[in-house]
Image (cartoon, rainbow, N blue to C red):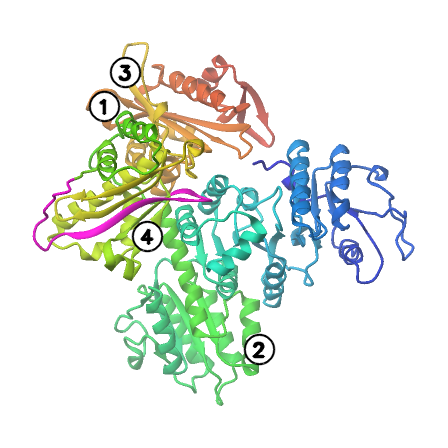
Amino acid sequence: MSLRHLDALLKPRSIALIGASARPGSVGALLMDKLGDGRFTGEVWPVNPKGHLEAGRAAFRDLCDLPATPDLAVIATPGRVVPGILHRLARRGGKAAIVLADDLGGGDEARRAKAERVLARIARRRGLRVLGPASVGLQSPGIGLDASLSPTRAPTGDLAFVTQSAAVASAAVDWAAARRIGFSHAVTLGDMVDLDFGVLLDWLALDEGTRAILLHIESVKDARYFMSAARAAARAKPVIVLKTGRSLAAARVVHARAGAIGGDDVYDAAFRRAGMLRVADLDELFEATATLAANRQPLGSRLAILANGGGLGVVAVDTLLDLGGRLAVIEAGALGRPTWAHGNPLDVTSDAPAERYAEAARALLAAPSVDAVLAIHAPSPFVPAAAPAQALIDAAASNRKPVFASWVGGASQEAARRLFVDAGIPSHETPRQAVRGFMQLVNFRRNRETLMETPASQPETFVVDTVRARQVIAAARAEDRLELTPEESLRMLQAAAIATAPTFRPIEGSAYDLAAALRSDPMFGPVLVFGRGGRVGRRLDDRALALPPLNMALAHDVMMRTRVWRLLQGGEGQRAAALDALALTLIKVAQIAVDLPEVESLRIEPLRVDARAAVAMSAHIVLMPPERTGSRLVIRPYPKELESTERLRDGRAFLLRPVRPEDEPLLIDMSARMTREDVRLRFFAPLPRLSHEMAARLTQLDYDRQMALVALGADADSARHAWGVVRIAADPDNETAEFAITVRSDMKGQGLGSLLMERITTYARDRGLKTLMGFVLSENEPMLSLSRRLGFKPTRVPDEPTVQKIVLRL
């Protein structure tokens, strides 16, 4: 995938409307009105074979007649002529095109598929970016661009919305416009012959005008690229996703439109692994839109509820507890009035004047035990709805904690809701909707924290004995079998260092029959499934899924999403040991998918665990047909092949290996052992300490796009320290990568920096990158001298006289 020419699509300076018309009711006329209304400040060139429009306005007969090559071509013609237009546009050097037509095959499915292959080939070979076909276009309100068939013009804002569905696009824009919620971009992908969610995520993650991203997904095309893009985007800004096609019937509809799709439960695991927040339906997506527009994040899940009646407050409490939130405990005296002590929900009574609302809201927002406030108001014969609404707005203005409003009712509440829209406070028609909006923020924060969590070191190291495992596989293949016998399956587990004991007898009453499995998903490849085994597990459907590979943090997260962890009994130490043993077993099962792609499916049942161990009692393994064997992982595993032992000129040995998430303490320790001046030269600013968030970003790598090599000492003592780290981050085009290097202050000038740079340069060249570049402070002469020896060329950075950019052509 590539981001090439995405600026031409989403921020064009010139547009050719091919199929422009003045005929009322035509697509060409609708777009001509939108593009020609003066809001878009760039050039608009109508193209019509007649050389004019019906209203007498001049038009260009063909693309070759245009005064220049347009950044963007909007194609509003019948589908049968689209391939020819794209050919001519590509020959002229066109950069981007929107294909609106959904009739490429004239009703014939085979012809439609063939035409889409032609469009994809043109896009791939010529570098022309194609949005669609069957797209309703896009809007970029910040530059006044509305190149869409949406009946509503989107207001300007900082939320990006990407969908495959024309109907959902129109509904979302219309809903948001009525609430004055604005968009940076609103894009309808259509049938995705070229551009898909992954590419848009990459571009939007870097877009300074986009604060959060909303997705409506039916299916993805390239699961591996999507996962890389989603993980990168979710680290940069909130990403909320609505995935439709959950039921079998809906999935068939999606399959008919989009081809192969993955299981809905696997999509759920993928979104969780990427750090995105999934919502259940359009209502929740709209609620998330309103919540994100307010741009306030809670520090926790403790909600205080303020209402002018007890009944609606109870509805909110029930919803909050059902969704896993917490009712804030109000400390005695925190609210000022004795009658309000410990009140949550806080009932200010139906005749409460605006001043009472303001007083209560200020007190709740000031309480340390409160993370957010929900104010509920039912129509009152004593107080007009707008007065307490304005009081709440005024109280919220001086506090950054999130505030939610639910003015329940009909016409009498409209004036208050308009006030909330103008003030940027999320307003919902029911308390349940408001609480769901709050919990979306809470769950998003939890997902981000999980994404950045530092995994514990594994209690033991292990490797899959692939030689031994493939001997079992070869024996089955020699007999033309895909299904292994029970004995062969257990030998495969033993090769993966998984404990097996068909006669295992646990401590009486202390063990549970569990199940762990690998299954193959058509979109996301191998998936780990864990939960209760036997009839109990099937009845409860108590299971959780995860994408391999796993570490201890991810394995524990899988277990915590089932009821299993509650079942493990015994003292705290015994419980922790059992959970660690079980987590390590799940890591080993997931590693089979990494190291043995020949395995199509695997099931361990029963998997027995007690206070001491986790043991596989029985296993069933099915192999992949020989013609389909190959790596299908959507998350690139730890590249063990990059490990090496290297020596400096003085003979000291170091282990160079890729950085792992659990290396975070090593990097924090290394930064603490560097001088303040060396830290400033590396990070361009004096940092008192490497924070957890920064260290997590430096250690939790997507090996598809990033690589970092750490130098560890070869002996037992020095191996506990990181002596130097070099890293690169490649662009999505895999053409250019930016490098950074850090060497401990007491290792400077001893050749470790040269060694690290040579190894990462070799890696970049082997990976196929074309350019390696970095930024260095002009005063950092040792680094500039090293870069010159390695062949880097320095250039000045515009408007940055203290910084040099160094570039190496690979």
Q: Quadrant of residue 328?
A: bottom left
The amino acid on which the numbered mark 3 sits, given as a three-letter code, is Ala
Marks 3 & 1, CB-CB < 8 Å contact: no
Which image quadrant: the N terminus? top right
Residue at the disc numbered 4:
544
Callout 2 environment at 10 Å: few (<14), some (14 to 19), or many (20+)?
some
Q: Residue at x 28, y 61 (%)?
A: 540
Residue 653 marker: 3
Callout 4 environment at 10 Å: few (<14), some (14 to 19), or many (20+)?
many
> Which residues lie in the magenta part?
501-526
Please determine whether, in this image, residue 413 is positioned above or below residue 72: below
The residue lying furthest to the left in this view is 508
Residue at the disc numbered 1:
718
Residue at the disc numbered 2:
415
Q: In this orientation, which residue lies closer to the viewer: 583 or 316? A: 583
Q: Residue at x 35, y 59 (%)?
A: 300
The amino acid on which the numbered mark 4 sits, given as a three-letter code, is Ala
Q: CA distance from mark 3 to mark 1?
A: 10 Å
Marks 2 & 1, CB-CB < 8 Å contact: no
Q: CA distance from mark 1 to mark 4?
A: 40 Å
